[in-house]
Amino acid sequence: AEFSLKGGNKSLKSILETMINFVVVLVLCLELANSFAPHSFIVRKPVYQLYATTLSSTQAEFSLKGYLSRLTPLIEDRLKECLSHQDTPETTKITEAMYYSLLAGGKRVRPVAACLAYDYIKGSPPVDASVEQLKEHYRDVLSLGVSIEMIHTMSLIHDDLPAMDDDDYRRGRLTCHKVYGEDVAILAGDSLLSSSFEYLVREGKGTVEPLRLLEVLERLSASVGNLGLAGGQVMDLECEGKPSKEVTLDDLRWIHKHKTGALLNIAVAGGAILGGADSSTVADLEVYADKIGLAFQVADDILDCTATSEELGKTAGKDEAVDKATYVRLMGLDGARDEARRLRDEAIETLGEGGEGLSALADFIVSRGN
């Protein structure tokens, strides 16, 4: 059959070829425009992938904001009850100090990362899942998330002490040692550390395959030691005040792969292990975790010299004041921004099908405002 058009008669074949060529050009133009679009909480896929998704699936693009609105209340509820069995008349003061810092707010990036990695392996619950269904789905991985958050809180309490960063404010209010004294703050941090392991084992017994629980516990323990946040913190202190020429980017990357990245690594790897991932998949996800761990610290260094104390909830400009080795100091502000974007993009490239949630997290880590 032929169609009669304004320009004369054209065969159906010719018309279809013209239409296809037009669509190809349109897609390429839209893809080019999309590459210049700013990042947000919604994962931006290439245009051709968006078309493919529309044709092959009704699944909407992942929204980190929507995910957090469902998950964060579950995290907070678990944090509020995690020390309840330790609260006796004799332990009131130390338990209060532990809760003071543990429930001070924050982004809860590490528990969220664990849950996203768990979903990456096991699959996400339905969007319309009830609260009870969500609690059941995330039961075991939230135990890991809460344990990691205890360790993270310990590190913040100790990091704020006069012997280390000597900070008076954290998350918009006085630090633990300014409220309870240095002695109680040190002990509260110690107790949070030991409680994290107790909590993970107590909650996981009977519900998690023993060998998987043991592997997660081993990794969690290692994340705090010489090849974890403690070792990273010591090297960070050693580099403080050194001239820039004596601190290399490799030094800085080692510091923050361990000081900052270790807990993100166990969050992602541990979430995947609890979800049933094999060793090869876990290894791939560890590469992703190392990238976002470094990106997190680069973003922190940038915020320290671009955001206000009110926005950060802690003292801004502290890194420069104590001559700390940072990415901004070694690379300049623009160089640090490029480095954060590079790490984010490389992290996302490691993910396979179903990685929209982890991609959105990587984007958030770089684009956050505090």
Image: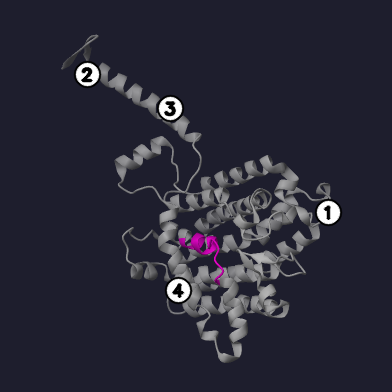
Q: What whole-number distance in Å separates the C-alpha atoms at marks 3 and 1? A: 49 Å
Mark found first going from the N terminus, 1 or 2: 2
Question: Where does the image place residue 231, in percent across and percent down from the top left?
Answer: 72, 65
Residue marked by disc 3: 29
Q: Amino acid at mark 1?
A: Lys
Mark found first going from the N terminus, 3 or 4: 3
Question: Where does the image place residue 138, in percent across and percent down from the top left?
Answer: 42, 67
Q: What whole-number distance in Å separates the C-alpha atoms at marks 1 and 2? A: 74 Å
Q: In the depicted view, which residue is nearer to us: 366 or 167?
A: 167
Quarter of the image containing the N terminus? Answer: top left
Left or right of 350, for residue 120: left
Left or right of 24, for residue 4: left
The picture quadrant where one finds residue 179 is bottom right
Q: Amino acid at mark 4?
A: Val
Residue marked by disc 1: 242
Residue marked by disc 4: 208
Q: Residue pushed farthest left?
A: 1
The residue that appears at 45% across and 71% down in the rendered structure is: 140
Mark found first going from the N terminus, 3 or 1: 3
Residues rendered magenta in the picture: 103-115
Q: In the depicted view, which residue is nearer to us: 178 or 339?
A: 178
